[in-house]
Amino acid sequence: MLVLSKTKKILIILLSVLLLITFSGCAGEKTGDNDKAGGDIVSEGDVNLPGENNENTIEPTVEPTPEPTPTPINFEEVKPNEAGKIMIVMFHNFVETFTPTTYDNGEYTTTFEEFEKLLHELYEMDYRLISMNDYLNNNISVPAGCIPMVFTFDDGTSGQFNLVEENGQLVANKKSAVGIIEEFNKTYPDFGVEGTFYLNLGNNTFQGEGTLEERLQYLVDRGFEIGNHTYTHANLKNLKTAAEIQEQIGKNQKEVFQLVSDYKMTSFSLPFGIWPEQDLRQYVYGGTYDGIEYENKGILEVGWSPALSPVSKNLDLSSIQRVRASGINPVDADLAWWLKNLSREEQYVSDGNANTVAVPESLVENVDLDKLDGKELITY
């Protein structure tokens, strides 16, 4: 007969109680042939005493975390319209101070101070950032009553983003668009840290500290996206052969593959907003260079108007419109102009549920049912 010490008896009792508590969440479930109505029988051989290693130790079952259920909304109060327009904003240059030159009168340049003010203005107007890929894939998730917006940045200038060393680590310069967005999100985390950078990797990209690989990896690790803008910012109209176009676009993709493992660019921003000749346009959508294939699901124009909803019947992903960011010298149809002239009713207002598409009954005719991709259409 096995005689247990008083200490071991106490330990067995304590561990038995703990095991019962651990498995109480599985009550009513059959876990094996030895299950009894009165619970499991625990013997000394089934328990790991201190200092012992028992291969038969029972590991607790970890239940998966259920997906949160979206909170029902009052449609008449929120007035969602997920067939409405989305502003895809086109940024270029960011500077501390600006002096006009013969080549730049300020239409495509803004200051860091004005950009920070813009973020506050957009937040107060219920705009929230989404990525370009979220737009292309109709995967829009912003709170109910909020309006999605996409930030795009062309040319890879250091004002958009550059790295500096801080306490022995490379971080985004706070005097850059990325640094300002990151700081803003410390106070307003629901605004989003999103943006797509259309780069020419044959030019100087994001000049600053660190290697080009470290710069791109920093962006990708934080949820930003990289898009194609040709290798050297080529005017496609001047390229006369399929090989030339595929080299400009495919070489850029090859470089990204080498710098950020397996990263595939999915959209293309037309340099100068110019297409090649009609018979060569197919190579903008997709092609091959040096064994590397590329495919652009969306082609972005140099913009002047908001883009259509991902479920709109009239949306053409081969010609996506953008809104020019307001420069130091504002122009008609820039972002400031649209913020004043585009009504809330015309814009994409979210229902807060990424799995549904909610539109007023009067606008349901604008929805392409084939673009719902399994999402439920709700009208009110």
Image (cartoon, helix red, strand yellow):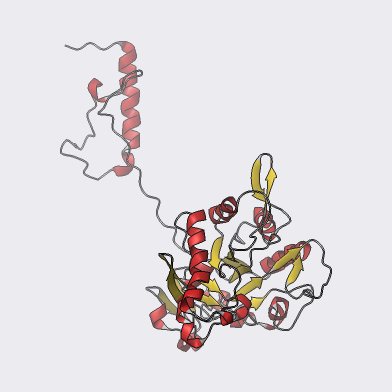
- 185 vs 327, nearest the viewer: 327
> Compared with residue 102, is residue 263 higher up or lower down, i.e. above or below?
above
Looking at this view, name the residue that lies furthest to the right. Answer: 99
Residue 103 image offset from top left, x and y in percent = 77, 75
> Compared with residue 311, is residue 211 higher up or lower down, i.e. above or below?
above
Residue 37 left/right relative to 156: left
What's the residue at 62%, 56% (across, down)? 189
> Compared with residue 194, is residue 361 higher up or lower down, i.e. above or below?
below
Q: Quadrant of residue 343?
A: bottom right
What's the residue at 57%, 76% (across, down)? 270
Whether residue 326 appears in this view of the structure is yes
> Compared with residue 87, is residue 52 higher up or lower down, i.e. above or below?
above
What's the residue at 28%, 24% (across, down)? 54
Whether residue 313 appears in this view of the structure is no
Residue 235 left/right relative to 325: left
Residue 131 image offset from top left, x and y in percent = 54, 66
- 302 vs 5, nearest the viewer: 302
Residue 156 image offset from top left, x and y in percent = 64, 63
Query: How many numbered callouts?
Result: 0
Residue 137 left/right relative to 230: left
Residue 287 image offset from top left, x and y in percent = 43, 73
Residue 334 left/right relative to 43: right
Q: In the rendered view of the protein, which quadrant contains the N terminus? A: top left
